[in-house]
Image (tube, coloured by chain):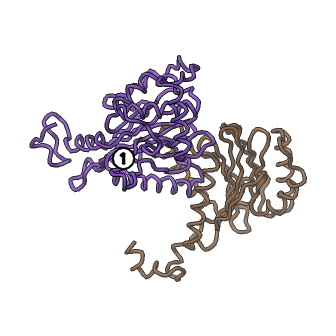
Chain colours: A purple, B brown
Amino acid sequence: MFRNQYDTDVTTWSPAGRLFQVEYAMEAVKQGSAAIGLRSKSHVVLACVNKANSELSSHQKKIFKVDDHVGVAIAGLTADGRVLSRYMRNECINYFYTYESQLPVGRLVVQLADKAQVCTQRSWKRPYGVGLLVGGLDESGAHLYYNCPSGNYFEYQAFAIGSRSQAAKTYLERKFVSFMASSRENLIKDALFALRETLQGEKLTSSACTIAVVGVGEAFHILDQETVQALINEFEIAGEEAAAPDQAGVDEPSAADDQAAPVDQSAAPMDM
Amino acid sequence: MNSFDSNPATNSLISSEADSQRTLYPYVTGTSVVGIKYKDGILLAADMGGSYGSTLRYKSVERLKPVGKHSLIGASGEISDFQEIMRYLDDLILSDNMWDDGNSLGPKEVHNYLTRVMYNRRNKFNPLWNSLVLGGVKNGQKYLGTVSMIGVHYEDNHVATGFGNHLARPLLRDEWRENLTFEEGVILLEKCMRVLLYRDRSAVNKLQVLFSLCGIHNS
């Protein structure tokens, strides 16, 4: 993407019908470190690479708990991510106060998307420079959504964002058919494998990654370092090849809709 | 809310000029509502009377209404305030349906929403002069609760408002059991309503009964 005369303002269209500022914001997401999400019928796993700038500093927080039933992993401008997480937490708490039940994840992401859209249509604002993988549970099951700076959102079986996410996506594309029926443990294993793909040969250690899980009967929580290291050891000892996931859901008809192609996917809800 | 504070009629909580702006006493009122859980859901009963003070003026007032797909509401107290509550609930259910996403507000959510409304009005010294019974079934889970005009709320297997608390609930405490059949539930409610007709001077002899059964309701 090169500089041109239509890219100064978010409220300026290009002759080709593009909003360059919005597209530049999506570039910022691609520069952030990788974040991965996958879901089964009953669980959602979020995983991300957490490299600290130097040995002296702590690493950036990329996974936020929004409520007991929802969490988010971000890639891009972490400050924008923090602000949006605070907004999401607020919305969940307010909903619970009025209705004493949990805000359905689908409604939360729509509110988030509408908030992002506002920033693409005001000359005094800029788009949020962060992509959010929202994973959560509600009455209709486990859900994984991706919210874009453009104000679009899509539902996914599995997705990866950030730098070198294509490697993870390739892995996920091979495996996603089995995810719906996957057990919690296999789902986490697949997340770790996908994460390893983004490291391009570097060793995967628990100090460089963060894993979070939410599921039926399991509130959203981030796994502690020992648990993660134990899981890494478990599958690395078993060899390079991923352990064969449960084959029960091989002919899930819905899986065909879930190709990880964000740009063209229409927002039609998936068959569950 | 600048104009609210600068207007002398409204800038003191209980000033006399502001009295025309808040509820002081009810005019057309409904009497008790009784609700019980039974095997397949919820049963609500109320008479169809609207009293104007001591006069039994209106005899076909529907004090029980369905709310959305899952809930039933019954109200005693000021009928016009009940109509206002129904407007709030219709808006709420409409917004909920407009999401068109497979999620829907169940009886627990509606009950909590009403609690917030009633309590907030009470805090402004402008209550909705009603006692409400809210019940329903969602995903096989039965729910029955009540909210008063000051925001007191609770759930139970059987609830009532007004005189129903004094005359019907003792009967229900003795004779209610888990998994009553529909017929048994109606007989029990009829017994309660009969006692209320004998002893409550605002009761009339025309009843409305609603039942909620796994999300479908009927009168």
Query: Where residue A134 appears, x then y in whole percent?
Result: 45, 42
Pick the quarter of the image with the N terminus of chain A: top left
Query: Where residue B173 appears, x then y in whole percent?
Result: 87, 55
- The residue drawn where x is 41% and y is 36% is A203
Q: In front: B156, or A81?
A: A81
- The residue drawn where x is 18% and y is 35% is A17
Total numbered labels placed on residues in the image: 1
Query: Where residue B210 appears, x then y in whole percent?
Result: 72, 44
Left or right position of B66 against A169:
right
Above/below status of A214 relative to A271: below
Circle 1 sits on which residue? A114
Outermost residue to the left? A5
Left or right position of A131 against A206:
left
Outermost residue to the top? A251
- The residue drawn where x is 25% and y is 48% is A121
* Residue B98 visible in image: no
The residue type indicated by label 1 comes to Asp
Could you say whether the residue bearing mark 1 is in a helix, strand or loop? helix
Identify the chain of the residue marked 1, using the numbered disc in the image: A
Q: Quadrant of residue A262?
A: top left
Label 1: few (<14), some (14–19) or many (≥20) C-alpha neighbours in 10 Å: some
Above/below status of B19 relative to B72: below
Q: In front: A200, or A68?
A: A200
Q: In front: A66, or B146?
A: A66
Query: Where residue A196 appears, x then y in whole percent?
Result: 42, 33
